[in-house]
Amino acid sequence: MEKKLAVVALGGNALLRGNQLGTIQEQEKNAEDTLKNLMFLIKEGYDLIISHGNGPQVGNILMRNDAGEQLYNIAQMPLDVCVADSQGGIGYMLERVLRNVLKEYGYNKEVVTLVTPVEVDINDPAFKNPTKRVGKIYTKEQADELTRQKAWIFKEEVKDLASGWRRVVASPVPKRVLNAHVIENMVRLGTIVITVGGGGVPVYYDENGVLKGAEAVIDKDSASAVLASLIKADEFYILTDVPYIFINYKKENQEIKEFLDYKDTKMYLEQGMFGEGNMAPKIKSCLSFIEKGGKKAVITEATKLEDKKYGSKITMEYED
């Protein structure tokens, strides 16, 4: 009998929380706390694929790039290489911590971290309207010079007490996870695969069929949903910082939605019931997974995963 397969997308707080500095000790402890919650799925007999975000980490890599160029004339690496860099570093940390957690719980399973290219369309409209902010805040003069030197695009930003200009890049729609068949083969053999980190390394094929890196970042939940559909996963989990989906969030008529079908979820999305900057992209990823044959998508907080009275479950039709 084939085991159920779940793709679990870890939210940002899986590694870095609140006002933490982001030391390796802090990130390892956060990772351990999060990964212990996944033992429930292994106990229930699931094979697992784990994806993760990389926002703060890739931002730090970009700032190290910038400092290295300014202080030591070290050539900057393009954004796709920085994403791959973050995939390797975060994946290694998650893999090492997960191996220790598995041992603690008495599970004998292999864990593999895979640097994962994800194909995008270089003609995606997102490249003409970049919105994803990355890296440090610059002065207007520095931003103008970088625009001249590197053709970077900047938008004004006010953050806490700091203000200035920050680079923006495209966030195109993911089309295909290039090594999905390798991932599926490994996970069907019982290996836990850590993959699609940070939404995957953005790549595209040019007019000559040559594979190239793109100056972009891909939404982690969207790429995870694409992978889940490609490998025909049974269930898709997005772990975030709230235990449920809410409509009219933080309003007087706020309402928890524990069970949702595809039709109603799409209706709420079109009515603007979910925040565009936070929950709406997660909802879109879940709907994409369901419409392509997925059985169930779940959005919940990591510590609530085992307690089935928490979490919002989206299926094609309401469950009996």
Image: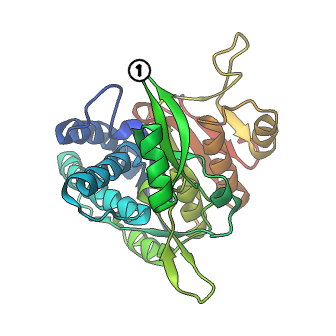
Name the foreground residue: 243 vs 116.
116
- Residue at 68 percent across and 55 percent down: it is 288
Q: Sort mark 1 into few (<14), some (14-19) or many (20+) by Cα contacts within 10 Å.
A: few
Judged from this view, the residue extending furthest toward the bottom is 208
Tell me the element at label 1.
Answer: loop
Circle 1 is placed at which residue position?
Answer: 161
- Residue at 50 percent across and 27 percent down: it is 158
Name the foreground residue: 307 vs 34.
34
Q: Position of residue 258 (x, y in %)?
A: 64, 30
Q: Quadrant of the C terminus?
A: top right
* 261 left or right, relative to 119: right
Task: Using the image, determine if residue 52 lies above or below residue 139.
Answer: below
Q: Is residue 134 visible?
A: no
- Residue at 30 percent across and 55 percent down: it is 65
* 30 left or right, relative to 226: left
Quarter-of-image position of residue 51: bottom left
Q: Position of residue 149 (x, y in %)?
A: 45, 60
Task: Using the image, determine if residue 169 lies above or below residue 314.
Answer: below
Amino acid type, label 1? Leu
Q: Position of residue 45 (x, y in %)?
A: 41, 55
Task: Using the image, determine if residue 255 lies above or below residue 210.
Answer: above
Total of numbered circles in the picture? Answer: 1
Name the foreground residue: 309 vs 176.
176
Judged from this view, the residue extending furthest toward the top is 252
- Residue at 40 percent across and 64 percent down: it is 78
